[in-house]
Amino acid sequence: MSFQTQILRYTDQELASLIEDETATEALGKEADKVRRANYGNEVYVRGLIEFSNYCKNDCYYCGIRKGNRKADRYRLSFDDILSCCEEGFALGFRTFVLQGGEDPWYTDEKVCQIVSAIKERFPECAVTLSIGEKSKESYQAYFNAGAERYLLRHETAEPEHYQKLHPDSMSLENRKRCLFDLKEIGYQVGSGFMVGSPYQTAENLVSDLRFLQELQPDMIGIGPYITHQDTPFANFPSGSLTKTLRMVSILRLLFPYALIPSTTALGTIHPEGRELGLKAGGNVVMPNLSPVSVRKKYELYENKICTGEEAAQCRGCLEARVKKAGYQIVTARGDVKKH
Ligand code: SAM
Ligand code: FES
């Protein structure tokens, strides 16, 4: 029986032990890489990330751009700014644009739809991904009708008690899940995920995350270590661990062979070769930053975020070299999920 088959049969207890087992990191990575190569070869997909607003009406306790952080220097990109980012990205070979921001009511549904339609009109062959938080089903439908085809919304943690420790009472896991199932029903390629090592998280919480993802069956799964930000209520909690994050990436690859799993900027922030290690552990997506350099430092979800000083072309070049060094190859296709 292959390790992949074994892991699919693991009890919650066995999964929790594996998650905590430092000695398993390397072997898990090797198994995950086999599965990833069987399904996606050595291809790594690129997504151009445009962080278009750091205003947020939410107050997630872990997040540097939470409403309550009075020190955050707020910005919004104009339609023209966003389109220029896409223009630059397109020239560099990007065929997917990810528009991410805080939950900023300034961008009404009408404005979001206008932006999405304008991008689709200008770049019909490109995929538009939104990552703008919790909305009504009607809003999600409107964005979909305007041309958005993918949506990223991490569930953050699948245990209601843990969720309430990370978020104020105005937010609920129930609504987060409702959003994810609405998005699926509408027909989006859906991405979810969580932070590894968030305050109060246990191995059992992480098992619940895996079980929830098995229920949701997302197309994309984004995980990264929790990283402390000093201007949040969690300033005194330590950041998550590199090796535990790598084990989680590998376990996800084994449980979800076809998933698009990014090797995240957060991984690259806690270790100089974090993104290379994330790819070797089973990741198959990278998301270089396309935001104008003038705003990059301001989208500070956590401390010491990397790639805040480079131009888009530099970021693209740097990641291409890193991907190659890790033994993979960047492809400039839209990179849709292969199948379930
Ligand atoms: N507002 C949108 C949302 O809620 O989905 C998108 C932006 S939100 C900042 C994107 C992701 O950043 C969150 O889902 C969270 O997992 C991650 N994040 C926020 N603060 C973080 C931190 N301190 N360390 C690591 N990741 C963090
Ligand atoms: Fe809204 Fe972080 S609290 S994006």
Image (spheres, rainbow, N blue to C red):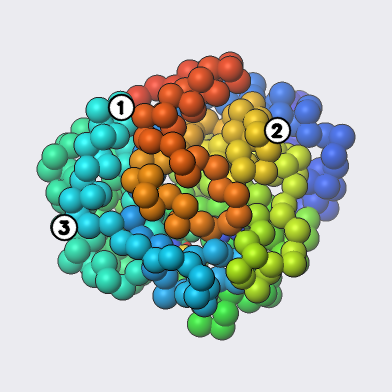
Q: Nearer the observer, disc 1 or disc 2?
A: 1
Q: Residue at x 60, y 39 (%)?
A: 268
Question: Which of marks 2 and 3 precedes in the sequence?
Answer: 2
Q: Residue at x 80, y 51 (%)?
A: 16
Q: Please, is residue 53 above or below residue 318 in the view? A: below
| Disc marking residue 92 | 1
Measure how far apart labels 3 and 2 are at the Cα level: 46 Å
Q: Please, is residue 170 above or below residue 259 in the view? A: below
Q: Position of residue 62 (x, y in %)?
A: 61, 66
Question: Which of marks 1 and 3 precedes in the sequence?
Answer: 1
- Disc 1 packing (10 Å; few <14; some 14–19; many ≥20): some
**Horizontal relation, residue 202 to residue 136: left or right:** right
Q: Position of residue 190 (x, y in %)?
A: 42, 50
Q: Amino acid at mark 3?
A: Gln
Measure how far apart labels 1 and 2 are at the Cα level: 40 Å
Q: Secondary structure at mark 1?
A: loop
| Disc marking residue 114 | 3
Measure how far apart labels 3 and 1 are at the Cα level: 24 Å
Q: Which residue is mark 2?
A: 5
Q: Nearer the viewer, residue 292 or 120?
A: 292
Q: Secondary structure at mark 3?
A: helix
